[in-house]
Image (spheres, rainbow, N blue to C red):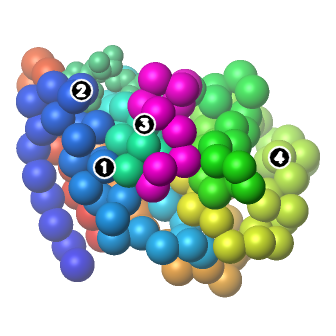
Amino acid sequence: MAEEIITHSAEETANWGREFAKRLSAPVLVLLTGELGSGKTTLTKGIVAGLGAAREEEVTSPTFTLVHVYGKPAKVYHADLYLIESFHDFETLGLEDIFAKPAVVILEWSERFPLQSPWPQVLIRLEHHGGDARRIRVA
Ligand SMILES: Nc1ncnc2c1ncn2[C@@H]1O[C@H](COP(=O)(O)OP(=O)(O)OP(=O)(O)O)[C@@H](O)[C@H]1O
Ligand SMILES: [Mg+2]
């Protein structure tokens, strides 16, 4: 289902994420790829809210904390591989444990470490498109 949209504000990107969330059912891996500030965390806010796991404002960048968990019981895992420097660090994220139960796993900078997972995957690419515009492509 190749698809492309252009958004013109952070709010529009998050709203698209809310709609997109309706298509997701656990277990699924959502791989986000795109430059700094392209909107990966903003999009995640919408997806997490759309899944009913947390409010948008509760979703923050996991850049330093590495993995955030939303929902009780855990429904959505959100990780950022940007600061992960080695395969050893990658392993310390404990992603194997996360994959033990069906969930929605959202990864920013997913291309840094190709992941071995039997779960279905959705790849979303985000790009700056001038000013506040962002191009979002789903593959
Ligand atoms: N159309 C848009 N979609 C998403 N964010 C936008 C848009 N227009 C402006 N912004 C702004 O761009 C920034 C996107 O930041 P965000 O943290 O979501 O990016 P990111 O891809 O997660 O970056 P990083 O790689 O640092 O984690 C925010 O400050 C947001 O308000
Ligand atoms: Mg981010």
Residue 73 pos. (x, y %): 73, 55
Under tag 2, what secondary structure? helix
Badge 3 density bin: few <14, some 14–19, many ≥20, Cα 10 Å: many
Q: Is residue 115 above or below residue 52?
A: below
Please tell me which of labels 1 and 2 falls first in the chain. 2
Q: Main secondary structure of the magenta part?
A: loop
Mark pair 4, 3: CA separation: 21 Å
Query: Quick check: is the Cβ at mark 2 less than 8 Å away from ligand 1?
Result: yes
Q: Residue at x 64, y 30 (%)?
A: 62
Please tell me which of labels 3 and 2 falls first in the chain. 2
Q: Quadrant of residue 38?
A: top left
Q: Residue at x 72, y 34 (%)?
A: 66
Q: Which mark is residue 18?
A: 1
Residue range of the region highlighted in magenta in the rendering: 51-60
Mark pair 3, 2: CA separation: 10 Å
Residue labelled with disc 4:
93
Q: Residue at x 16, y 66 (%)?
A: 3
Under tag 1, what secondary structure? helix
- Which of discs 1 and 2 lies nearer the camera? The answer is 1
Tell which quarter ligand 1 is in.
top left
- Is 99 or 31 nearer to us in this picture? 99
